[in-house]
Amino acid sequence: MTANATPDLGGRCYCGAVGVQSVSPPTSIINCHCHQCRRLSGAAFTTWLSLPRQATAISGAANLQHFAPSENGLRYFCKHCGTHVFTEDRRMPDILGVPAGILSTALPSNPSGHYFFSDKASWTACGDDTPKFGGPSGFERVDA
């Protein structure tokens, strides 16, 4: 790899039946505290990578099931182990949302912000200096 080359980002579901590999860096990395992400992950928030669809390959696609939590979103899970592998949003057809928890490689940078912070779980604290966004849209700067 040359000094300017981007290392591949890769990950897989728990059982290994489905994999994600991207040769492009993420266009963004965020922490999402919305109710939907908390329920689907079972955690206080989900850290998401937005990966360019054209630079991202999914292996084992026959092992996927999907769920439509909204009119714009499709969430894809391994039908064997239940791991949430990626999300599609009809409003952003060139992007795949990949939960950072499935990565087997390091994040290329820290998340740029906490989004939907006004919806965060009452039992968690985020004392870091990462910018926080919330309000009705989930994207307005908030002081926390």
Image (spheres, helix red, strand yellow):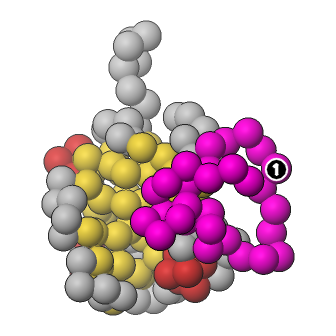
Residue 36 is left or right of residue 76, and the answer is right
Q: Secondary structure at mark 1?
A: loop
Please identify the dominant SS of the magenta region: loop
Write down the region rendered in magenta.
116-144
Q: Residue at x 36, y 88 (%)?
A: 69
Between 95 and 5, the residue placed more toward the observer is: 95
Residue 12: % across, % down: 47, 63
Residue 119: % across, % down: 61, 73
Q: Quadrant of residue 25?
A: top left
Residue 85: % across, % down: 42, 70
Q: Quadrant of residue 5?
A: top left
Q: Residue at x 48, y 63 (%)?
A: 138
Magenta segment: does it hold 92?
Answer: no
Instruction: Say if residue 7 shows up in the picture.
Output: yes
Residue 51 is left or right of residue 17, and the answer is left
* Structural crowding at the residue carrying mark 1, measured as other residues with C-alpha within 10 Å and reported as few (<14), some (14–19) or many (≥20): few
Magenta segment: does it hold 143?
Answer: yes
- Relative vertical location of residue 102 with respect to residue 5 in this rendering, above or below: below
Between 81 and 30, the residue placed more toward the observer is: 30
Residue 127 is left or right of residue 48, and the answer is right
Instruction: Say if residue 19 shows up in the picture.
Output: no
Between 32 and 138, the residue placed more toward the observer is: 138
In the rendered image, the quadrant that contains the N terminus is top left
Residue 132: % across, % down: 62, 50
Between 50 and 104, the residue placed more toward the observer is: 50
Q: Residue at x 77, y 44 (%)?
A: 128
- Relative vertical location of residue 92 with respect to residue 111 in this rendering, above or below: below
| Residue at the disc numbered 1 | 127
Q: Residue at x 26, y 69 (%)?
A: 89
Name the kind of residue labelled 1 in the image: Gly
Q: Residue furthest top?
A: 3
